[in-house]
Amino acid sequence: MPTRFALAASLAVLFAAPALSRADSQPPLAVASASFTPGTPIPRRFTCDGGNVSPELHWSAPPAGAKSLALVVEDPDAPVLFTHWILYNLPPQTRSLPENASAQMDLPPGASQGINNFGAIGYGGPCPPPGRPHRYVFRIYALDARLDFPAGITRVQFDAAIRGHLLASGSTMAIFGH
């Protein structure tokens, strides 16, 4: 019986190994913004109370082998994870996005945007209900593939598409409340 258990345990480890993310072995991407200081309130200009303008973001170089970059902005404090922006197929040499990049004309060539939880394509700024401030996480992903989707993918499609393709990631966070 111990031999069967040892064999089963060895097989479980062997088959689980490919499921481990290659991102775990890479240093995280450094992500920052000239539009806000990490952990502090995001200026109203970038929220639903202001211009709903996407903030400036910049990040460090992805690891070798990156074929594309993706960005997700999410509110983990909403009752259900709320997605504010999905941007994918950024060229891997891209190191920044200017303010208001969500406007199609400001996106790098080949980049596409997904549908946010407001039901629109592009950036939808922080807009929590009254109460305690929510956190807004701006996460960059380095992927070993381009995503084969036209503009308008959903978060579920995005998450499924990047599974097994993540090389590295990094994030920064701001808060906002009413």
Image (tube, grey):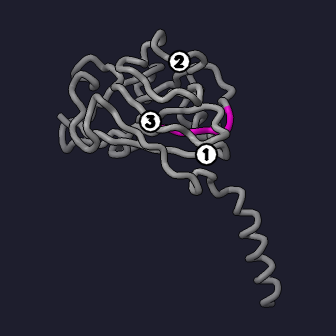
Nearest the camera: 103 or 2?
103
Mark 1 neighbour density, 10 Å: few (under 14) some (14–19) many (20 or more): many
Give percent across and percent down for residue 164.
Answer: 67, 46
Q: Is residue 143 magenta?
A: yes
**Residue at the disc numbered 1:** 167
> What secondary structure is the magenta-colored segment mainly?
strand
Q: Disc 1 vs disc 3: Cβ atoms closer than 8 Å?
A: no
Q: Is residue 36 left or right of residue 18?
A: left
For the point 43% across and 43% down, the residue is 30
Report the magenta residues as a range.
Answer: 140-145
Give percent across and percent down for residue 24.
Answer: 57, 56
**Residue at the disc numbered 3:** 59
Q: Quadrant of residue 66?
A: top right
Give the label on residue 108, or none.
Answer: 2
Tell me which amino acid carries mark 3.
Trp
Q: Is residue 4 above or below residue 58?
A: below
